[in-house]
Image: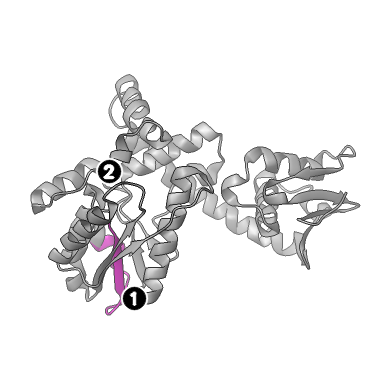
C-alpha cells in the first residue's frame, strides 16, 4: 500500500496538498493510512474528505466515524460533506456525480492539488466486464485512469484483499457498506457472481488479466484520441448553437477516428456521455458514410444530427 502511494504521489512538488476520498470502507481507509505515513516523507500536506450521501439511516454517524479515523491517522484537514443525490444516471451514476462534485468543491475550498480515490485492481476488472456487457468501445474497456485531472487512483494495481490485510495490520476497523452486497446493483452482481464463476472456469488470474487489458487498451485509446483531436481541428466548426462537421474531410478517415470526432461533436452539442451509446454514434456515422436520404438522427438530451449538403449539423434547435 505504501509503495503504491509513494509511486502515485512521487511527482508532486513539496508543499502540495492531497486529499483522500474516504468512505470508511477497507479500501479508502487503508489508502488513508498509507497516505498518512508517506505524505510527510514527501513533504506533502495530507487531509481527507468524507462524503455523506444520505442514502442510509445513520449515514451521518458513519461519515463522522470515518472522519475521526482519518484524524486519528494524522490527516488534517478532514471534512465531512453531506450531499443530495439526484436521479440522473440511475442510483449508482447519480451518487457518483454527487460524490465527485463534493470532492471537487472540497479541493477548491481547501486548496488541494490532488484528490486520491481508492479504486483497486478488482474495481478495474469489474469496470472492464461492465463495459464488455454494454458492448462498449476501447475507451470504456480501458477502465479507470490512474490520473484524470484533479483525481488520482494510486491503487489500481493493488488487490482488494491487500487493502483488507492492510487494515488488519494497521489496527483499523473499516465500515462495510451494505450496498456492496445488494444484488440490485450490476457491479455487485459482477463482483459476487460473475468474477467468481470466471475464476473457477478459467483459473486464477482473471482479475489481474482484465485489469492488464484495461491498461493496454487505455494506451491505444489515448493515442487514437490525440489523432481524433487533430482531425477535429480540420473537420469541426462551431456556429452559435450548432456543431458543424465537414463530411468531405471525415468520410474517408478510418472509422476509429471518424466516430471519435462524431462522438465529441455530439457531446459538444449537448449530449451527456452516459446517455450517448455506440448505437447513436453508428447512426450518426451512417449520415456521413451511408447516406440514403435519412432526414435526421435524434440523440439524447434533445440533440439532433442532420445532414445538410456537404455538412453534418448537430444541435438542439436543428431542423431537417
Residue 157, given in percent of the width and then of the height, sits at 30, 48
Name the outermost residue toward the front: 57
Earlier along the polypeptide chain: callout 2 or callout 1?
Answer: 1
State the scheme by which the image is colored.
one colour
Residue at figure coordinates x 40%, y 63% from the top left: 102
Q: Position of residue 213 (x, y in %)?
A: 42, 40
The image shows residue 319, relative to residue 181, as above or below, that is below
Answer with the quarter of the image where residue 161 lies.
Answer: top left
Residue 146 in percent (x, y) is at: 39, 55
At horizontal 73% and vertical 49% (from top left) the residue drawn is: 253
* The stretch drawn in magenta includes residue 183: no
Outermost residue, top side: 201
Q: Residue at x 44, y 39 (%)?
A: 128
Q: Is residue 249 above or below residue 288?
A: below
* First to last magenta residue range: 6-22
Q: What is the quadrant of residue 228 in the picture?
A: bottom right
Residue 78 location, x and y as percent? 25, 68
Instruction: Reply above or below: 240 against 309.
Output: below
Question: Can you identify the residue that label 1 sits on?
Answer: 110
Label disc, if present, on residue 305 of the rendered structure: none
* Screen quadrant of the N terminus: bottom left
Q: Nearer the viewer, residue 170 or 260?
A: 170
Q: Residues within 10 Å of mark 1 (few under 14, many from 20)?
A: some
Q: SS at mark 1?
A: helix
Tell me the SS state at disc 2: loop
Was residue 16 drawn as part of the magenta stretch in this picture?
yes
Q: Is residue 4 above or below residue 295?
A: below
Q: In the image, what residue occupies the spot 17% across and 62% down? A: 68
Q: CA separation, marks 2 and 1?
A: 27 Å
Pointer 2 residue: 177
Q: Nearer the viewer, residue 234 or 20?
A: 20
Amino acid at each position: 500500500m505504501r509503495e503504491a502511494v509513494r509511486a502515485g504521489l512521487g511527482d508532486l512538488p513539496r508543499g502540495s496538498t492531497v486529499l483522500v476520498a474516504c468512505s470508511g470502507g477497507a479500501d479508502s481507509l487503508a489508502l488513508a493510512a498509507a497516505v498518512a505515513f508517506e505524505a510527510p516523507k514527501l513533504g506533502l500536506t495530507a487531509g481527507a474528505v468524507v462524503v455523506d450521501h444520505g442514502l442510509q439511516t445513520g449515514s451521518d454517524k458513519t461519515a463522522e466515524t470515518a472522519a475521526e479515523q482519518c484524524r486519528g491517522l494524522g490527516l488534517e484537514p478532514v471534512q465531512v460533506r453531506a450531499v443530495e443525490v439526484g436521479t440522473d444516471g440511475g442510483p449508482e451514476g447519480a451518487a457518483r456525480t454527487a460524490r465527485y462534485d463534493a470532492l471537487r468543491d472540497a479541493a477548491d475550498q481547501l486548496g488541494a492539488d490532488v484528490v486520491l480515490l481508492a479504486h483497486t485492481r478488482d474495481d478495474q476488472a469489474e469496470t472492464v466486464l461492465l463495459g464488455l456487457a454494454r458492448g462498449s468501445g476501447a475507451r470504456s474497456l480501458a477502465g479507470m485512469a490512474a490520473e484524470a485531472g484533479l483525481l488520482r487512483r494510486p491503487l489500481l494495481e493493488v488487490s482488494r484483499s491487500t487493502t483488507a490485510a492492510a487494515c488488519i495490520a494497521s489496527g483499523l476497523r473499516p465500515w462495510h457498506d451494505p450496498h456492496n452486497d445488494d444484488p440490485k446493483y450490476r457491479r455487485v452482481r459482477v463482483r459476487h457472481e460473475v468474477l467468481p464463476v470466471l475464476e473457477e472456469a478459467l483459473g486464477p488470474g482473471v482479475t489481474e488479466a482484465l485489469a492488464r487489458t484495461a491498461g493496454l487498451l487505455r494506451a491505444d485509446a489515448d493515442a487514437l484520441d490525440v489523432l481524433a483531436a487533430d482531425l477535429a481541428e480540420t473537420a469541426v466548426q462551431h456556429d452559435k448553437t450548432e456543431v458543424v462537421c465537414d463530411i468531405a474531410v471525415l468520410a474517408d478517415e478510418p472509422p476509429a477516428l471518424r466516430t471519435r470526432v462524431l462522438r465529441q461533436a455530439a457531446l459538444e452539442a449537448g449530449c451527456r456521455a452516459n446517455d450517448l451509446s455506440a448505437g447513436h454514434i453508428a447512426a450518426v456515422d451512417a449520415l456521413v458514410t451511408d447516406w440514403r436520404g435519412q432526414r435526421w438522427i435524434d440523440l439524447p438530451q434533445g440533440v439532433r444530427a442532420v445532414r445538410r449538403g456537404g455538412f453534418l449539423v448537430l444541435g438542439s434547435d436543428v431542423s431537417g
